[in-house]
Amino acid sequence: MNANRSPVASGLNAALRHWRLAGVLWLSLVLPAGLACVPLGRMAAPLDDSPFRETLLAGWDSWAVLSWLRSIGPAMDSFGPLLVLVVAASAFLQLFLSGGVLRALLADVRRPVLGRVLTESVALFRPYLRAFGRFVLALVLRGALFAALPAVLLTKLAGKDAPPHGTLSTVAFWWALVAGIGVYLMASLRFDLARIALARGDSPTSRGAHRVARARLTGSRLSAVALLVSWLFLGLVVQAVFTNLGVRMNPSTGGGLLALLLVRQGGFLVLAMVRVGFWASLLSWEAARRPRAARPVFVPQAAAATGTAPGAPAAAAPAESLAEPSPEGQPG
């Protein structure tokens, strides 16, 4: 990564250069989703074999399909546990692969990336798992202390008979929302910086990595939060664009349905590129705040050989060299 670029510029450049790393993260979404294809296909088999299939495709409406899925809630109950399993497997793979992706970014590896990411991810998985446990614990404790507890106290002060939109009730709601978001952002930043510390080798343990993360954030919390929020906003924009595009496509044939699926997967790939870009930005931001090593004092070679410190007066010449030669030693 170029040290002369800003963190955002470094992230955008890395998102385009390391699109293969984004592809690895995209696989962590696609592979768990493949677990749901078989039972979902069995559920849709009666419709797929019926004459209503072509009618549904010809009159396709994305919002109507979502409404139809909500209307068959009882039939989807058996699909619920599998959906939870898919989400859990995807989250696990994201956590597992993050260490390998960070080390590939640090080494600026462009190809091949899959084997490198898997190897580095295995090496970092145990400390990353412990760092994730610390992240969850800190999120729960800080959320309860700084968001939930003040909101509960304000609600108690409002009383049981207080109007739902009274002053104290409104303040309690907004306090819980804003403070909860702030706690989550700071906990996420500490977790990401701890993962960077582990990937760089700044600390071999998750506890030491979180200490390094706190040291990096000291005096720089606002810039770190601004960086995180900017990439979150970019991710929301990407998701909104591809979702709106998918809704407007409304395919009328099987080929159109395949095109819709490819567009949605393209959106997920771009989201993975945004994730890679954020990590590259955070690496650049963190590198600018690393403690600089003390510059060595330059000692001239002649001074080092004589043991004389730079700037010290030179030693006086021996008396013999200053004495005049004796007459016997002069030529006659």
Image: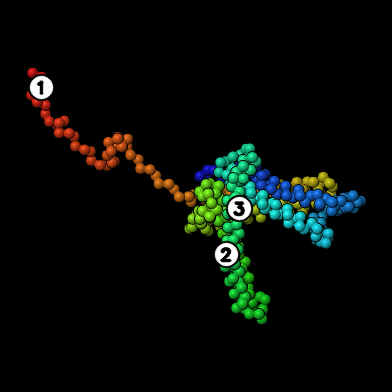
**Horizontal relation, residue 221 to residue 172: left or right:** left
Q: Which residue has dot 2 on it?
A: 142
Query: x%, y% of residue 320?
Result: 15, 31
Residue shown at the point (70%, 54%) measured from the top left: 88
Q: Disc 1 versus disc 3: distance between alpha carbons?
A: 89 Å
Q: Residues within 10 Å of mark 1 (few under 14, many from 20)?
A: few
Query: x, y percentage for residue 153?
Result: 59, 74
Classify 10 Å Cα crowding around label 2: few (below 14), some (14-19), many (20 and above): some
Measured in 3D between alpha carbons, the distance from the residue under mark 2 to the one under mark 3, in whole angstroms, is: 20 Å
- Few, some or many residues within 10 Å of mark 3 (<14, 14–19, 20+): some
SS for dot 3: helix
Residue drawn where x is 70% and y is 52% of the image: 89
Pick the front one: 249 or 278: 278
Where is residue 35? Give x, y as percent.
76, 49
- Give the quadrant of the C terminus: top left
Do we see residue 25 in this rendering? yes
- Quadrant housing the N terminus: top right
Quadrant in the picture for residue 224:
bottom right
Asked whether 96 or 70 is in front, the reply is 96
Q: Nearer the viewer, mark 1 or mark 3?
A: 3
Query: Does residue 316 sit above or below 285 in this rendering?
Result: above
Residue at (55% x, 47% y) in the render: 199
Q: Identify the mark at residue 330; answer none if there is no mark.
A: 1
**Residue beneath disc 3:** 129
Dot 3 amino acid type: Leu
The numbered mark, 1 or 3, whose residue comes first in the sequence reads 3
In the displayed structure image, the side of residue 34 where residue 6 appears, left or right: left
In the displayed image of the protein, which residue is found farthest to the top?
332
For the residues labelled 2 and 1, the Cα–Cα distance comes to 94 Å
- Three-letter amino acid code of the residue under disc 2: Arg
Q: Nearer the viewer, mark 2 or mark 1?
A: 2
In this rendering, is residue 137 above or below 303? below
